[in-house]
Amino acid sequence: MVTFKTTSPDEQEKTHNIFEGPITGGKALAEKLEERARKKNFKKGYTYLLTAAVILTAYSVYFLYDQVNLYLSASGQISALESDIGNYENVILPNLRKEKDLHKAAYDEEFRTVEGVLNTVFPEDTDKLGIITMLENFATSINTEHPPFEFNSISFEEPKKENGYTVLPISTTIHSSTANFSRFLKLIDLSGHLNAEIPVRLMEISNINIRYRGTDEKTGEDKGVDFTVKLNAYSR
């Protein structure tokens, strides 16, 4: 059996809606939630700050430490560098200049010596008188120690121009001992050598005719050699 209960208007006015009035304790709850969130955010911010400090410290140790040491030692390095520069400018560089001047003086002296030798062995002109003087001096020196060596005649032909040099043909007839004949050939062979003890005008034998006189039947001495030789003397 179902029973329906009716209320009068007066009773309806006495019935209240629980959602019509303010919630008891709502403001205090909100403040607690806000305080909790603020603490949480503070912890989070502190954590971020601490993490950043750790990272910065690590960076300083691993990256900035060496740079700081370099910076602190830079003044000492600069002083050492300035000292090295001063030593270079005041000691090393003057010594290098002095050594260069000494080498230059030695080079100039050697160049003058080589130039003098070159002018002897390969002169600028034909210098016929120089050739005669050289051959006479040679003949005198060996004829004194190992006689005989005698020039019977000497003549010059007209100089001939070749590729950048001049050839002077010379004809001469000589009587000498066999030993001195060998010495004459050696003289021609040494001619033109820049490092010879006595520089000799550059010459070569173009033709030679030889007649050996043999030996003395009684004494066995060498009777010597007669030879006619044609030479070419060179000049620039």
Image (spheres, rainbow, N blue to C red):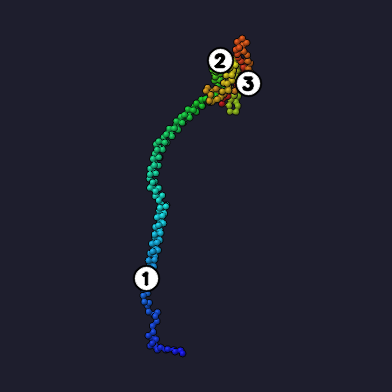
- Decide: marks 2, 3 in contact (CB < 8 A)? no
- Vertical comparison of 211 with 60: above or below: above
Disc 2 is placed on an element classified as loop
* Nearer-N-terminus badge (2/3): 2
Q: Which residue is mark 2?
A: 146
Determine whether, in the image, residue 82 is placed left or right of residue 129.
Answer: left
Image point (60%, 10%), residue name: 219
Image point (42%, 89%), residue name: 5
Image x and y of residue 167, in percent: 59, 24
* Nearer-N-terminus badge (1/3): 1
Instruction: Give the residue type that dot 1 points to.
Output: Lys
Image x and y of residue 38, in percent: 38, 67
Q: Nearer the viewer, mark 1 or mark 2?
A: 1
Q: CA distance from mark 1 to mark 3?
A: 134 Å
Crowd class of label 2 (few under 14; some 14 to 19; many from 20; radius 10 Å): few
Q: Which residue is mark 3?
A: 207
Q: Quadrant of residue 20?
A: bottom left
> Which residue is most to the front?
1
Image point (38%, 47%), residue name: 72
Q: Quadrant of residue 100?
A: top left
Instruction: Give the residue type that dot 2 points to.
Output: His
Number of the label disc, if any, that sits on residue 68: none
Number of the label disc, if any, that sits on residue 32: 1
Disc 3 is placed on an element classified as strand
Q: Nearer the viewer, mark 2 or mark 3?
A: 2
Image x and y of residue 58, in percent: 41, 55
Crowd class of label 1 (few under 14; some 14 to 19; many from 20; radius 10 Å): few
Image x and y of residue 12, in percent: 39, 86
User: Observer-nearest residue: 175 or 77?
Assistant: 77
